[in-house]
Amino acid sequence: MDAPARLRMNRTALFPVGFLALCALPLATTVPGLQVLLLVPLVLTVWVLRTGLDITGEGLTVRALVGSRHVPWAEVAGIRVGPKGDLWLVRTAGTELRLPVVRARDLPRLADASGGRIQLSAQ
């Protein structure tokens, strides 16, 4: 079985998170009780590293900060492009699931990673 295709947030998003940690460090170390400020960059780091989309032979797994949802290929009806270029997975049950990280410009990469299960068509 092939390894899953992982579409994740660009790791350069960690630079502003690191800058935020550097800015919060003096305040968190000098004022008692403000050490909790250091949790914000930690949570943002986990969010950047975890949020994304895994594409396997069995289906798609949408990962968020706290949870994930697996959708088998049999339940995928298509992909809808939102008004701002965001992508929504349309399920056969009629429900939709927002795909994080990927945008309309990523459709060719998403179609390629799906192994032909998601096809692009001009309208």
Image (tube, rainbow, N blue to C red):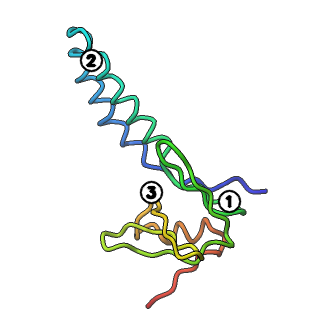
Q: Looking at numbered disc 2 in the image, what kind of residue is underneath it?
A: Leu
Classify 10 Å Cα crowding around label 3: few (below 14), some (14-19), many (20 and above): some
Q: In the rendering, which numbered label is found on residue 100? A: 3
- SS at mark 1 in the image: loop
Q: How many marks?
A: 3
The percent coordinates of residue 118 (x first, y second) are: 59, 75
> Residue at left 47%, top 61%?
99
Q: Quadrant of residue 80?
A: bottom left
Q: Looking at numbered disc 1 in the image, what kind of residue is underneath it?
A: Thr
> Residue at left 69%, top 73%?
74
The residue that mark 1 highlights is 56
The residue that mark 2 highlights is 25
The percent coordinates of residue 12 (x first, y second) are: 38, 42
Q: Is residue 56 above or below residue 67?
A: below
The percent coordinates of residue 51 (x first, y second) are: 48, 47
Of residue 47 and residue 91, the one placed in the foreground of this image is: 91
Classify 10 Å Cα crowding around label 1: few (below 14), some (14-19), many (20 and above): some
Q: Quick one: label 1 or label 3, which is nearer the N terminus?
A: 1
Quadrant containing the C terminus is bottom left
CA gap between label 1 and label 2 equals 40 Å
